[in-house]
Image (tube, helix red, strand yellow):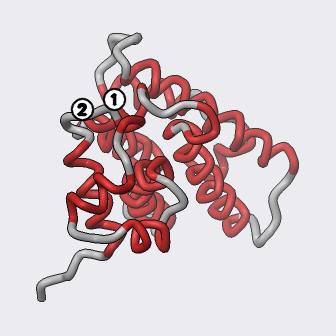
């Protein structure tokens, strides 16, 4: 059966295409909507701004990875590797997103926040609906460290392979999360 693309997916493809030739921060909502035959009103029914759309593109893929981890289809190490591979497989687009989004609209922040929400939900569910302050801190700390490390690695500040960076990120897991992620 042929699956129709959602409005969000079409808007995502549009900004993705435009980001191949222009910095993300220079792309306008009008350009995004003109490129896919939609109106700005349609855009704003789905996203607050283009930065939310850019983060949604990564988060949409990452949520599938979290789902695979949560259902036991893959290990946490495999999930971390898959999240790194999303970036590595589309280096041009994500370099643009990391370099050309800053402040509260930064791609880096929005994706880390969504990861924290998903991991918090998973630990809470795995722990009969409760989560300790230490675990909340450790989730925030771990994902902040992962995001910073991946960003530096991705922007070629570290010469690691995908498997090496995955191993480093996996091994940096805080003790309070090991019971849930190993």
Q: CA distance from mark 2 to mark 1?
A: 5 Å
Q: In which image quadrant can residue 43 be found?
A: bottom left
As displayed, is residue 69 above or below residue 103?
below
What residue is shown at x 59% (from left), y 39% (from top)? 109
Residue farthest right in this picture: 133
Count residues near mark 2 (Cα–Cα under 10 Å), then give few for <14, some for 14-19, many for 20+.
some
- The image quadrant where one finds the N terminus is bottom left
Is 16 or 71 nearer to us in this picture? 16
What residue is shown at x 48% (from left), y 47% (from top)? 51
What residue is shown at x 68% (from left), y 57% (from top)? 120
Q: Is residue 139 left or right of residue 154?
A: right
Residue 75 seen in the figure:
no
Give the SS element for disc 2: helix
As displayed, is residue 109 above or below residue 65?
above
In percent of width and height, residue 27 lies at 34, 42
Q: Which residue is mark 2?
A: 92
What residue is shown at x 40% (from left), y 20% (from top)? 153
In percent of width and height, residue 124 lies at 73, 64
Residue farthest left in this picture: 1
As displayed, is residue 152 above or below residue 121?
above
Residue 88 seen in the figure:
yes
Is 96 or 173 nearer to us in this picture? 96
Q: Is residue 177 left or right of residue 161?
A: right
Q: Which residue is mark 1?
A: 95
Count residues near mark 1 (Cα–Cα under 10 Å), then give few for <14, some for 14-19, many for 20+.
some
CB within 8 Å, label 2 to label 1? yes
């Amino acid at each position: 059966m042929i699956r129709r693309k959602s409005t969000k997916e079409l808007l995502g493809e549009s900004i993705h295409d435009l980001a191949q030739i222009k910095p993300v921060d220079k792309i306008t909502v009008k350009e995004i909507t003109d490129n896919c035959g939609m109106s700005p009103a349609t855009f704003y029914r789905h996203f607050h701004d283009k930065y939310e759309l850019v983060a949604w593109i990564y988060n949409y893929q990452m949520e599938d990875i979290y789902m695979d981890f949560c259902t036991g289809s893959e290990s946490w190490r495999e999930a971390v590797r898959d999240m790194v591979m999303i970036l590595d497989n589309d280096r041009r687009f994500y370099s643009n997103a990391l370099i050309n989004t800053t402040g509260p609209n930064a791609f880096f922040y929005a994706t880390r926040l969504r990861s924290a929400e998903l991991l918090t939900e998973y630990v809470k569910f795995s722990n009969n609906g409760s989560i300790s302050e230490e675990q909340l801190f450790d989730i925030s700390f771990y994902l902040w460290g992962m995001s910073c490390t991946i960003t530096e690695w991705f922007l070629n500040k570290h010469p690691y392979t995908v498997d090496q960076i995955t191993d480093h990120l996996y091994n940096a897991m805080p003790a309070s999360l090991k019971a849930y992620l190993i």
